[in-house]
Amino acid sequence: MQRSTAPSARGPLRYALLDSPLGPILAAAGGRGVVRLAFADRGPEPLLEELALLTGAEPREDPGALGGLARELDGYFAGRVRRFTTRPDLSLAPAGFSRRVLEAAARIPYGTVATYRWVAALAGSPRAARAAGNALHRNPVALLVPCHRVVPADGTVGGYGGDEARKEALLRLERALSAGAAPGGRGRGRPCGSLRA
């Protein structure tokens, strides 16, 4: 993995393990915002080790420091929060195209979907849909940068870090899938105006 600038440079790196209806979520924040938000299916240890390696700082457990995010996530999963106010810090994402892809995905509104091609085009490389998918797969701040809202042009749900059922559950929570969309199969999402490509 490529080492990036340490998010802990502007404050200590704090983390919390949060509960969600789709599994435990590890949240970590530095002085500039949330640097890691990921489903901790294998427990928090692998994610904490990765954070320490990438930042050069030992994350310290501090649920109180992430209380605002925890409340927002509770509201999101209850259908009350449609836009997060918690600020993501993309310093763990590679600079250049990958970061531009994440910035493009962050513009996709709640309840809508966009294609990998649209995200790639917005990031400056319209023919790089596959590379955009790779960048989204490495999204360090899932949900805050809603990579689950990016779908293939063929109308399928597509992948989500190996957990298509979770991606489908998130899209259904946001009512971004049409009623006729079959689990794991074909079905049209609700496009975001001109975001479909």
Image (tube, rainbow, N blue to C red):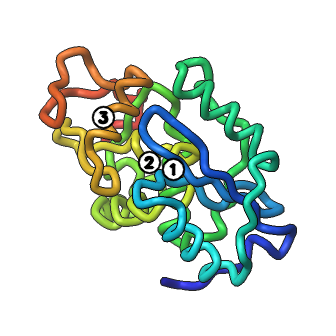
Pick out the residue farthest to the right: 11
Q: Nearest the camera: 67 or 109?
A: 67
Q: CA distance from mark 1 to mark 2?
A: 7 Å
Q: Percent x, y for residue 182?
A: 15, 26
Can you say whether 139 is above or below 97 in the image? above
What type is the residue that disc 1 sits on? Ala
How many C-alpha atoms fall within 10 Å of the one at disc 2: few (<14), some, or many (≥20)? many
Q: Position of residue 156 (x, y in %)?
A: 19, 38
Task: Give the distance between the C-alpha atoms of the residues marked 3 and 2, in whole angstroms.
Answer: 12 Å
Q: Amino acid at mark 2?
A: Cys
Q: Amino acid at mark 3?
A: Glu
Dot 3 or dot 2, earlier in sequence: 2
Task: Give me the residue at 49% from left, 43% from top.
Answer: 146
Question: Residue at 60% of width from left, 18% of height from top?
Answer: 80
Residue picked out by circle 1: 142
| Dot label at residue 147 | 2
Could you say whether the residue bearing mark 3 is in a helix, strand or loop? helix
Q: Residue at point 57% right, 54% down?
A: 26
Given this view, does label 3 or label 2 mark the residue nearer the observer?
Answer: 3
The reply to whether the C-beta atoms of the residues labelled 1 and 3 are less than 8 Å apart is no
Q: Which residue is mark 3?
A: 168
Which residue occupies the foreground of this view, 109 or 85? Answer: 85
Q: Tell which circle, 1 or 2, labels the residue nearer the N-terminal end.
A: 1
How packed mark 3 is, by other alpha carbons closer than 10 Å (few <14, some 14-19, many 20 or more), is many
